[in-house]
């Protein structure tokens, strides 16, 4: 994986070393200030990586909370619909009940009227007395008239009585219906109360989750601000580091080195090329960065071979590069190998082409096991493909 961040440091060191007769002496030229800065940069990079991890986890929390909120909002809408349905039912029941009450009242009025009518008739009959009543019948002109008068009275009274009966039973039926609707209204009122309580609960829950979403957003903003601060600090360290390395390079340019290798490179390992030399989007740093070399995807523990003979310039931890080896091949040319799990060579050691110098890994700023391989001319990274078979 590309460790652009470290590249300049390495570049300068490598240049200095390739130029120098004794690489160990050049290595020693690194100042304590330089080492301090390197440690600081490395520490900051680790912090940034941690912040990013934290950021991802908080973002995932935020996503979960937001999903929950959507769920609860949906529940709330459902309960609201339910509530308005129950409310409609309740209103309907109340209207029905009012209608039935009106009905009963009307029937009672009708009955009272009928009763009054009958009473008036009975009072009239009583007032005239049985004799008068009899006289009315006796005054009948003939038998047919008598029968007619008699049955008229009987008919009227019977009619009044049966009308009263009908009104009473109609009233009873309506009152029965009234009781049924009353019971139903009580049930609906109870349900209305329950759904209202449920709505309050869901509303409460919604508020809680919304608060959680807000606090998680705040947390995320804080982490992002922290990360921005660290990245700014890192850029400053890198700039200082580059300045110091420039100085070292100028000092080392006075000496010149001869050819140390064959001049024809071999691949440090065989594997899928997972990233090539050039500009690309950095998966960890989330920014566009220049990739200084070729990434060869190989399992951790794969032997890393020296691309050519030379002298080991750097062998050790190099921040984002992880466990790192740089070899000087003379004539200002050097090769670098990053993200190793284990190093097998020491600074100043002579190596032959094909020697196993390290075992591959995924140390430093890396997303998976691979060898990050660079070729540098006077410390500047160049396309390794131009040197490889
Ligand atoms: Zn790389």
Image: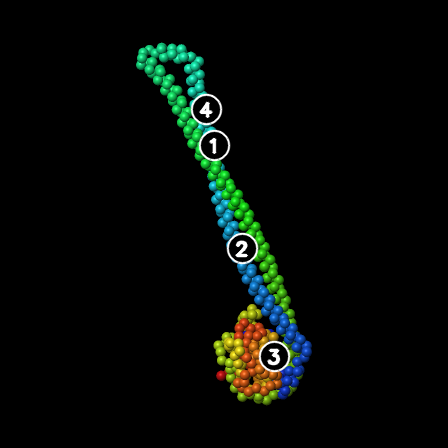
- Nearest the eye: 238 or 32: 32
Crowd class of label 4 (few under 14; some 14 to 19; many from 20; radius 10 Å)? some
Badge 3 or badge 2: first in the primary sequence: 2
- Residue 358: where, in percent of width, then height? 56, 81
**Residue located beneath label 1 in the image:** 101
Asked if the residues shown at circle 1 and circle 4 are in contact, with their CB atoms under 8 angstroms apart, the answer is: no
- Nearest the eye: 176 or 95: 176
Query: Looking at the image, which residue is at 44% across and 13% down?
Result: 127
- Nearest the eye: 69 or 259: 69
Check the image and report above or below for 293 versus 119: below
Badge 3 or badge 1: first in the primary sequence: 1
Asked if the residues shown at circle 3 and circle 2 are in contact, with their CB atoms under 8 angstroms apart, the answer is: no
- Residue 355: where, in percent of width, then height? 54, 85
Q: Is residue 380 in view from this perspective?
A: no
| Badge number at residue 202 | none
Asked if the residues shown at circle 4 and circle 3 are in contact, with their CB atoms under 8 angstroms apart, the answer is: no
Query: Looking at the image, which residue is at 46% across and 27% down?
Result: 108
Q: Secondary structure at mark 2?
A: helix
Q: CA distance from mark 3 to mark 2?
A: 50 Å
The quarter of the picture where residue 349 lies is bottom right
**Residue located beneath label 3 in the image:** 316
Asked if the residues shown at circle 4 and circle 2 are in contact, with their CB atoms under 8 angstroms apart, the answer is: no
Check the image and report above or below for 12 versus 134: below
């Amino acid at each position: 994986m590309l460790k652009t961040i470290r590249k300049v440091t390495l570049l300068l060191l490598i240049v200095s070393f390739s130029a120098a007769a004794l690489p160990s002496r050049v290595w020693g030229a690194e100042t304590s200030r330089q080492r301090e800065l390197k440690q600081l940069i490395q520490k900051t990079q680790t912090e940034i990586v941690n912040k990013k991890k934290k950021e991802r986890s908080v973002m995932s929390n935020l996503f979960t909370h937001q999903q929950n909120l959507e769920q609860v909002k949906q529940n709330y809408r459902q309960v609201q619909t339910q509530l308005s349905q129950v409310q409609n039912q309740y209103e309907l029941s109340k209207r029905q009940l009012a209608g039935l009450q009106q009905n009963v009242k009307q029937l009672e009025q009708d009955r009272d009227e009928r009763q009054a009518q009958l009473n008036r008739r009975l009072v009239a009959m009583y007032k005239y007395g049985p004799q008068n009543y009899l006289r009315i019948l006796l005054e009948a002109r003939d038998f047919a008239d008598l029968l007619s008068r008699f049955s008229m009275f009987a008919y009227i009274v019977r009619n009044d009585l049966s009308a009263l009966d009908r009104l009473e039973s109609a009233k009873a039926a309506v009152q029965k219906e009234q009781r049924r609707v009353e019971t139903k209204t009580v049930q609906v009122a109870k349900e209305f109360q329950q759904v209202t309580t449920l709505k309050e609960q869901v509303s409460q829950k919604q508020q809680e989750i919304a608060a959680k979403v807000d606090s998680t957003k705040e947390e995320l903003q804080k982490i992002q601000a922290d990360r921005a601060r660290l990245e700014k600090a890192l850029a400053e360290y890198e700039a200082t580091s580059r300045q110091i390395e420039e100085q070292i390079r100028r000092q080392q340019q006075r000496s010149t080195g001869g050819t140390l290798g064959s001049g024809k490179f071999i691949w440090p390992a065989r594997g899928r090329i997972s990233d090539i030399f050039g500009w690309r989007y950095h998966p960890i740093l989330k920014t566009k960065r220049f990739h200084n070399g070729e990434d060869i995807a190989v399992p951790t523990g794969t032997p890393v071979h020296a691309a050519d003979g030379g002298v080991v310039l750097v062998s050790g931890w190099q921040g984002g590069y992880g466990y790192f080896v740089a070899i000087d091949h003379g004539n200002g040319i050097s090769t670098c190998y990053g993200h190793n799990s284990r190093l097998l060579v020491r600074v100043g050691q002579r190596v032959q082409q094909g020697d196993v110098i390290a075992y591959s890994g995924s140390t430093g700023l890396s997303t998976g096991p691979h060898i990050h391989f660079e070729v540098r001319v006077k410390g500047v990274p160049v396309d390794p493909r131009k040197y490889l078979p």
